[in-house]
């Protein structure tokens, strides 16, 4: 077998012998001990001479029956005839009952009963077949490992949440995107569209019991009723990393470093991906300089956030709908196109001095961290959610083919929305699984992930089922994965064909000749 290697030479049966039980359990013990220390040790410890694993018996199994179950009792001809007659009568009665039930159905019920159920998942959702699960687990494994390296702790919350949590954070308009309903207790609930409000609820519920700062992460499934497009589903998984209790820019730098570490782990470079950086404080200064009031601020942020998607003229038109004059709208858009701190400071003067100094510090720290090449200052990055209070950032693919890969920022006032007596400094990001998988496919960075099985154990016939179970259990207890062929076979070709299909590294045949010799087994 070129695909499935056979273990060389454990108790090889002579060429004239049938394909028999091809190793003693003592040899399996030696094999296990050897494989733990590496394949080379496994080969030497078991006195190898060929390419098939042999499994043999010993006295411990002598109590097992040597033959199969006794043959069933035979019926006389008269008894057979009577049994057949009774069976036909019962079938006729069952057919009449089915016909009666069908006659009582309405046409609509009859039609519904004959309609085939859709085999597709609900619109915007996904099935994950085993090969897709391997890819998903690979991706999530990298995310979790990065979180571990940065000393974040994992948490989780119910997928069913209080609808009011999200209304408080994003306003009543969020309900149009929620899978929300009234439960049987009369409570307004929803499948969570994101995780941050649940985290805020959890932190708030613990009060002073939590020692700040805390660094937590999660990988929840989220639900949002949106238009389906490339990189956007109605359900997705989202990697969240959040820091509560750290007021300085160091929190954002740590999050950015975690993101870039992840990108590097999956094979992406600064030539593939960048992270745009801005500050809500800078944006506030820009809008104030153009006469935008605090009452208009949140609505203007949402509109300006669409700049890259819908273009300048459409943004200006929407701003006009919110009471912003067209010439003011154009000045806002032009200002947001500034790409350097110097230009921004010259335009805004002292109004944005503190915010610009904070951004400059972030870029200095990023260079010290060795991640400066990934970051780009972009005054147009808004992140439409109005609760952001400081630095905001957004990951993007440099070819511009995809939606934002990841987004986040500082949200120091979020906790007060849910009843906290005072603001709690916090920052975090949300990183969905859909866009990054599109990008990794685009860059051919997804590894080939096939099923891998250490051993396939093959019983020769029904009498060898018991010994094969013993071998399988011994392998699994030793830490190996073992797939037991559920239907015994004497055909070596069939066994190896199955092993190829399940990614078997070794095949262990368990057959009678050597087993009966009592050459080994558990002592």
Image (spheres, rainbow, N blue to C red):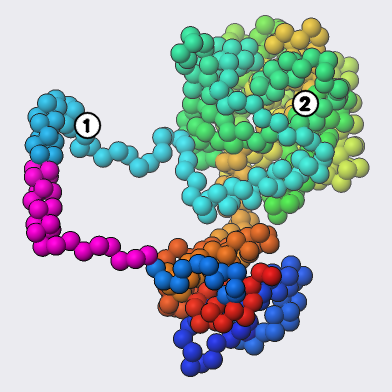
In percent of width and height, residue 120 lies at 38, 41
Q: Residues within 10 Å of mark 1 (few under 14, many from 20)?
A: few
Frontmost residue, 48 versus 314: 48
**Residue at x 57%, y 65% (from the top left corner):** 470
* Residue holding disc 2: 427
- Which quadrant of the view contains residue 419? top right
Asked if residue 36 is among those painted magenta in the image, a careful observer would answer: no
**Residue at x 17%, y 27% (from the top left corner):** 108
Q: Which mark is residue 230?
A: none
**In terms of secondary structure, where does tag 2 sit?**
strand
Residue 263 visible, this angle: yes
Residue 284 visible, this angle: no
In percent of width and height, residue 362 lies at 86, 33
**In terms of secondary structure, where does tag 1 sit?**
helix
Q: Residues within 10 Å of mark 2 (few under 14, many from 20)?
A: many
* Residue holding disc 1: 112
- Residue 403 relative to residue 332: left or right: left
Frontmost residue, 410 versus 342: 410
**Residue at x 12%, y 34% (from the top left corner):** 97
Numbered disc in front, either 2 or 1 = 1
**Residue at x 57%, y 26% (from the top left corner):** 159
Inter-mark Cα distance, 2 to 1: 52 Å
Q: Residue furthest bottom?
A: 16
In percent of width and height, residue 45 lies at 73, 79
Residue span colored magenta: 69-92
In percent of width and height, residue 137 lies at 62, 48
State the predominant SS element of the stretch in magenta.
helix
Frontmost residue, 7 versus 281: 7
- Residue 166 relative to residue 338: left or right: left
- Which quadrant of the view contains residue 385? top right
Q: Quadrant of the C terminus?
A: bottom right
């Amino acid at each position: 077998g070129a695909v499935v290697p056979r273990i060389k030479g454990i108790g090889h049966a002579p060429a004239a012998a049938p394909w028999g039980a091809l190793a003693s359990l003592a040899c399996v013990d030696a094999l296990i001990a050897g494989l733990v220390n590496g394949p080379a040790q496994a080969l030497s410890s078991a006195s190898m001479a060929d390419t098939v694993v042999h499994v043999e018996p010993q006295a411990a199994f002598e109590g097992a029956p040597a033959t199969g179950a006794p043959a069933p009792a035979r019926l006389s001809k008269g008894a057979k005839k009577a049994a057949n007659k009774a069976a036909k009568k019962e079938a006729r009665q069952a057919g009449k009952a089915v016909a009666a039930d069908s006659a009582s159905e309405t046409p609509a019920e009859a039609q519904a009963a004959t309609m085939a159920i859709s085999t597709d998942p609900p619109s915007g959702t996904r099935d994950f077949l085993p090969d897709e699960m391997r890819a998903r687990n690979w991706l999530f494994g990298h995310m979790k490992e990065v979180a571990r390296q940065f000393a974040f702790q994992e948490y989780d919350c119910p997928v069913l949440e209080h609808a009011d949590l999200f209304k408080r954070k994003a306003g009543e308009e969020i309900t149009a995107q929620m899978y929300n309903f009234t439960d049987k207790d009369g409570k307004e609930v929803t499948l969570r569209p994101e995780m941050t409000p649940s985290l805020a609820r959890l932190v708030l519920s613990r009060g002073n019991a939590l020692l700040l700062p805390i660094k937590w992460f999660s990988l929840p499934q989220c639900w949002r009723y949106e238009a389906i497009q490339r990189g956007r589903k109605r359900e997705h998984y989202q990697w969240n990393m959040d820091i509560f209790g750290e007021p300085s820019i160091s929190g954002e730098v740590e999050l950015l470093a975690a993101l870039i570490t992840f990108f590097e782990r999956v094979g992406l470079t600064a030539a593939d991906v960048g992270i745009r950086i801005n500050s809500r404080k800078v944006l506030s200064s820009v809008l104030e300089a153009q006469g935008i009031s605090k009452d208009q601020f949140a609505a203007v942020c949402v509109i300006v956030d669409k700049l890259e998607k819908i273009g300048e003229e459409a943004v200006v038109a929407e701003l006009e709908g919110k009471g912003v004059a067209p010439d003011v709208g154009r000045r806002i858009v032009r200002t947001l196109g500034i790409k350097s701190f110097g230009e921004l400071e010259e335009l805004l003067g002292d109004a944005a001095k503190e915010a610009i100094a904070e951004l400059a510090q972030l870029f200095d720290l990023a260079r010290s961290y060795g991640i400066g090449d990934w970051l780009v200052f972009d005054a147009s990055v808004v992140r439409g959610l109005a609760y952001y209070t400081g630095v905001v950032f957004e990951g993007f693919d440099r070819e511009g083919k995809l939606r934002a890969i990841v987004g986040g920022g500082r949200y120091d006032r979020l906790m007060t929305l849910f009843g906290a007596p005072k603001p709690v400094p916090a920052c975090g990001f949300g990183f969905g699984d859909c866009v990054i998988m599109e990008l990794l496919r685009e860059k051919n960075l997804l590894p080939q992930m096939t099923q891998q099985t250490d051993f396939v154990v093959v019983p020769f016939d029904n009498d060898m089922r018991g010994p094969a179970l013993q071998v399988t259990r011994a392998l699994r207890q030793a830490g190996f994965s073992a797939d037991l062929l559920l239907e015994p076979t004497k055909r070596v070709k069939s066994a190896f064909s199955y092993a190829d299909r399940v990614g078997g590294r070794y095949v262990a045949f368990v057959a009678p000749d050597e087993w009966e010799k009592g050459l080994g087994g558990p002592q």
